Image (tube, rainbow, N blue to C red):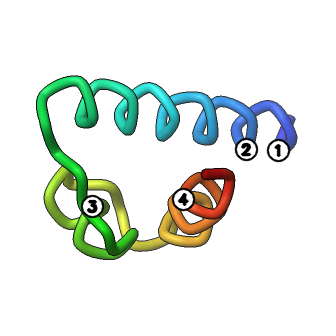
Protein backbone atom coordinates (compact mmCIF):
# COMPACT_ATOMS: atom_id res chain seq x y z
CA UNK A 1 0.00 0.00 0.00
CA UNK A 2 2.91 2.37 0.66
CA UNK A 3 4.17 1.93 -2.92
CA UNK A 4 0.76 3.03 -4.15
CA UNK A 5 0.95 6.35 -2.25
CA UNK A 6 4.51 6.94 -3.40
CA UNK A 7 3.35 6.57 -7.00
CA UNK A 8 0.32 8.79 -6.40
CA UNK A 9 2.49 11.54 -4.90
CA UNK A 10 4.97 11.37 -7.78
CA UNK A 11 2.17 11.54 -10.32
CA UNK A 12 0.56 14.51 -8.56
CA UNK A 13 3.86 16.40 -8.34
CA UNK A 14 4.40 15.81 -12.05
CA UNK A 15 0.93 17.16 -12.82
CA UNK A 16 1.51 20.24 -10.70
CA UNK A 17 4.85 20.85 -12.39
CA UNK A 18 3.38 20.59 -15.88
CA UNK A 19 0.53 22.88 -14.89
CA UNK A 20 2.93 25.40 -13.34
CA UNK A 21 5.09 25.39 -16.46
CA UNK A 22 2.02 25.95 -18.64
CA UNK A 23 1.27 29.04 -16.56
CA UNK A 24 4.81 30.38 -16.93
CA UNK A 25 6.20 29.25 -13.57
CA UNK A 26 9.78 28.27 -14.31
CA UNK A 27 11.04 27.85 -10.74
CA UNK A 28 14.67 26.91 -10.80
CA UNK A 29 14.70 25.61 -7.22
CA UNK A 30 12.68 22.60 -6.22
CA UNK A 31 12.26 24.04 -2.74
CA UNK A 32 10.87 27.32 -4.11
CA UNK A 33 8.53 25.32 -6.34
CA UNK A 34 7.32 23.19 -3.41
CA UNK A 35 6.75 26.25 -1.24
CA UNK A 36 4.93 28.13 -4.00
CA UNK A 37 2.59 25.24 -4.71
CA UNK A 38 2.10 24.29 -1.01
CA UNK A 39 3.62 20.84 -1.31
CA UNK A 40 4.25 19.39 2.16
CA UNK A 41 7.89 19.35 3.25
CA UNK A 42 7.84 15.58 3.70
CA UNK A 43 7.45 15.33 -0.09
CA UNK A 44 10.39 17.60 -0.96
CA UNK A 45 12.49 14.58 -1.90
CA UNK A 46 9.83 13.60 -4.44
CA UNK A 47 9.85 17.15 -5.81
CA UNK A 48 13.63 17.01 -6.06
CA UNK A 49 13.40 13.74 -8.02
CA UNK A 50 10.88 15.34 -10.40
CA UNK A 51 13.21 18.28 -10.99
CA UNK A 52 16.13 15.94 -11.65
CA UNK A 53 14.15 14.22 -14.43
CA UNK A 54 14.59 17.32 -16.64
Label whose residue precedes the other's in the sequence (3 or 1): 1
Label whose residue precedes the other's in the sequence (2 or 3): 2
> Quadrant location of residue 51?
bottom right
Q: Which residue is mark 4?
A: 51
Label whose residue precedes the other's in the sequence (2 or 4): 2
Q: Position of residue 15 (x, y in %)?
A: 44, 26
Q: Which residue is mark 1?
A: 2
Mark 4 to mark 3 CA distance (whole Å): 10 Å
Q: Which residue is mark 3?
A: 33
Element carrying mark 2: helix
Q: In the image, what residue occupies the spot 14% across and 58% down?
A: 36
The relative height of residue 37 versus residue 4 in the rendered view (above or below) is below
Q: Position of residue 24 (x, y in %)?
A: 13, 36
Label whose residue precedes the other's in the sequence (4 or 3): 3
Could you tell me if the residues under marks 2 and 3 are in contact, i.e. CB atoms within 8 Å?
A: no
Crowding around mark 2 (Cα neighbors within 10 Å: few <14, some 14 to 19, many 20+) is few
Mark 4 to mark 1 CA distance (whole Å): 22 Å
Q: Position of residue 25 (x, y in %)?
A: 16, 45
Could you tell me if the residues under marks 4 and 3 are in contact, i.e. CB atoms within 8 Å?
A: yes
Could you tell me if the residues under marks 1 and 2 are in contact, i.e. CB atoms within 8 Å?
A: yes
Mark 3 to mark 1 CA distance (whole Å): 25 Å
Q: Which residue is mark 2?
A: 6
Amino acid sequence: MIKFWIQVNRFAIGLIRRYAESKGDSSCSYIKFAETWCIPSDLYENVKEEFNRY
